Image (cartoon, grey):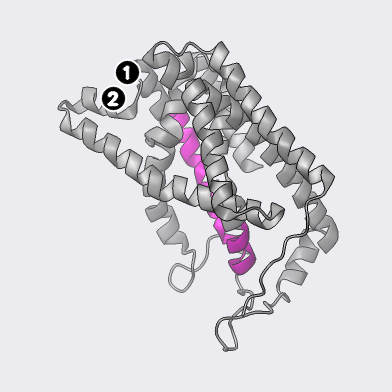
Amino acid sequence: MAVDYQPRGLEVEDIVVVVLYFLIVLGIGVYATFKSNRGTVSGYFLAGRFMTWLPVGASLFASNIGSEHFIGLAGSGAAAGIGVGAFEFNALILLQLLGWVFIPVYIAGGVCTLPEYIHRRFGGQRIRIWLSVLSILLYIFTKISVNLFSGALFIRLALGWNLYLAILLMLFMTFLCTVTGGLAAVIYTDTLCTFLMAVGSLTVMGMGFYEVGGYGGLQEKYMHAVSNDTLFSNSTCGRPRDDSFIMLRDPVNSDMPWAGFIFGQTIASIWYWCADQVENTMKILSGRDVWDNTWLKVMLYVIYTI
């Protein structure tokens, strides 16, 4: 049976950090409210198309890397090894496809949304409405729900708050910033979150490698790490896989077959990275011009490699 985690009481430093974070996020939302032109469709939904490559790239990163990754991918990595990292390396190639192929087409079309582009390309209103509804439903069930739960779970474990109170707080903050500031507020807050996630992740990674004795120490200690609590009493339950430090594995008898990943996952990922209206396309269209998007290709390649 798993042992219930009992969070320690909040220290003064914890309270100060949490309060400062929420105040800064609200401040950025207020700043975006006055800076952006929200009186037009382009101004509200595309931040006036004046965003440079840096905030757009940071927003794309923050949209993909969130609480579900810090909790889910970390747990998957601890359970099965580095194979989960293949998804992010796969993104490196597809982001170049986005930058060199899809972005010029979107910009040349002069559209505000992907459904609008599909409507112009193929005609008819039904396909436009269908794609809009499909995008919203997919985002609710595959992103928003997971983000809310994983984020609230982290807050409950770290700060001891009620799970539903944490969800309501995140919804309120998101609603306040998004409705009042439009896409500009979303991009600015995403830029802040990208900086915090990058600095925090690299710091924790450095501390972790120091504690285990570097990458070699991680390989040695990981293979001897056995879970204290298991659901099934068999000889292999909770034991590290022999291929834990292989990213793309046997095509038949593994959980990350290289053939299925390359030829199957890549096709699905093209939609996610290059044609997902809510996650990526809208933010790409907020860029100023093709020059900014050229720098965006370089930035995304570097940041996802890190």
Q: Which mark is residue 109?
A: 1
What range of the chain is rendered magenta?
A: 74-101
The residue positioned 42% from the left and 60% from the top of the image is 259
Q: At x 69% / y 78%, what residue is drawn?
A: 226
Residue 103 position, x and y percent, is 42, 25
Query: Which of the pair 29/125 is nearer the observer?
Result: 29
The answer, for residue 68, to whether it is visible in the render is: no
Q: Which residue is mark 2?
A: 117
Tag 2–tag 1 contact (CB < 8 Å): yes
Label 1: few (<14), some or many (≥20) within 10 Å?
few
In this orientation, which residue lies closer to the viewer: 150 or 164? Answer: 164
Q: Assign a secondary structure to mark 2.
A: helix
Q: Residue 59: which quarter of the image?
A: top right
Query: Which quadrant of the rendered structure holds the C terminus?
Result: top right
Q: Quadrant of residue 252?
A: bottom left
Magenta span has 35?
Answer: no
Q: Earlier in the sequence, mark 2 or mark 1?
A: 1
Pointer 2: residues within 10 angstroms few (<14), some, or many (20+)?
some
User: Looking at the picture, does residue 120 appear above or below residue 134?
Assistant: above
Image quadrant holding the N terminus, namely bottom right
Marker disc for residue 230: none
- Rendered residue at 56%/81% (across/down): 231
Q: Could one spot residue 24 in this view of the protein?
A: yes
Along the line of sight, which residue is nearer the eye, 41 or 88?
41
